[in-house]
Image (spheres, rainbow, N blue to C red):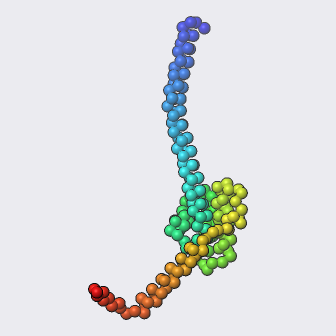
Amino acid sequence: MTPDQIALAQLEVAKLQAWITAVAIFLGPLAGVLFTFWFQSRKDKAAEKHRLFLTLMGERKGLVISLQMAHALNTIDVVFSDNSTIVALWHKYYALLSQPPGEARVHTWLELLAAMAADLRYSKLKQTDLDKFYIPQGHVDQLDFQREVQAEWLRVLKNTERFIVEPKKEP
C-alpha cells in the first residue's frame, strides 16, 4: 500500500469516526430523554395505582360511599387497564352493586382488593388484613343522629302545609 492510499484510508476512517461521533452526540441525549419519559410514565402509572389502592383500602368499609371512593371506583378501568384480572373483578363487583348486599359482593370485593395488592407487590398483605377495618363509634353515632334528624325534618315538612313566621317582639 502506498503512502497516498494509507492517507486516504485514514481519511475515510476519520470521516466514519466523525459521522459516528455526530450520530452518538445526537442520539445519546435523545435516548436519555426518551428513557426518562418512559421511566417517568411507568413511575406515574405505579403511583396512580398505589393512590387508587390506598383510597379503596382506606374507605373499604365506610358507613357511606364518599365522593373520593366513588371516584376511585370509577377509575379502576383506566388505572388497572393493563391487568385483565382486576378489570374483570371490578366488572363483576360493579354488577353486584345493583343487587342487595350479600356474601357474593363481599367475596368479590375482597378478591378485587387482593388482586390489586398482588399487582402492587404487597405480598405480605393477607385477605384477613383486607377485611379488617376501623370505624370510631362516634362516627356511627353521628351518622345515626343525622339520619334521625333528616327523617324528622322530612316528616314535619311533608305533614305541614305552611310555616307562619312572626317577627319576634322587642322587649
Q: Does residue 11 appear to the left or right of 104 in the view shown?
A: left
> In terms of depth relative to the viewer, which is nearer, 96 or 10?
96
Question: x, y (%) of residue 87?
Answer: 61, 63
Picture residue at 35% right of the left edge, 91% below the top: 162
Of 52 and 81, the residue lying toward us:
52
Residue 24 falls left or right of residue 123: left
The quarter of the rendered structure image containing the N terminus is: top right
Where 66 sits versus 25, above or below? below
Q: Residue furthest front?
A: 171
**Which x, y percent locates residue 64?**
55, 73
99 is higher (above) or lower (below) than 66:
below
What residue appears at the point 66 percent right and 72 percent down from the top-left corner?
A: 106
Residue at 30% in and 86% down: 168
* Rendered residue at 54%/71% (across/down): 65
Quadrant in which the C terminus appears: bottom left
From this viewpoint, is residue 141 visible? yes
Examine the rendering and report whether any part of residue 81 can be seen: no
Could you tell me how many numbered marks the image carries? 0
On screen, 150 above or below 1?
A: below
Between 149 and 98, the residue placed more toward the observer is 149
**Can you name the residue that lies furthest to the top here?**
3
Residue 57 screen position, x and y as percent: 61, 64
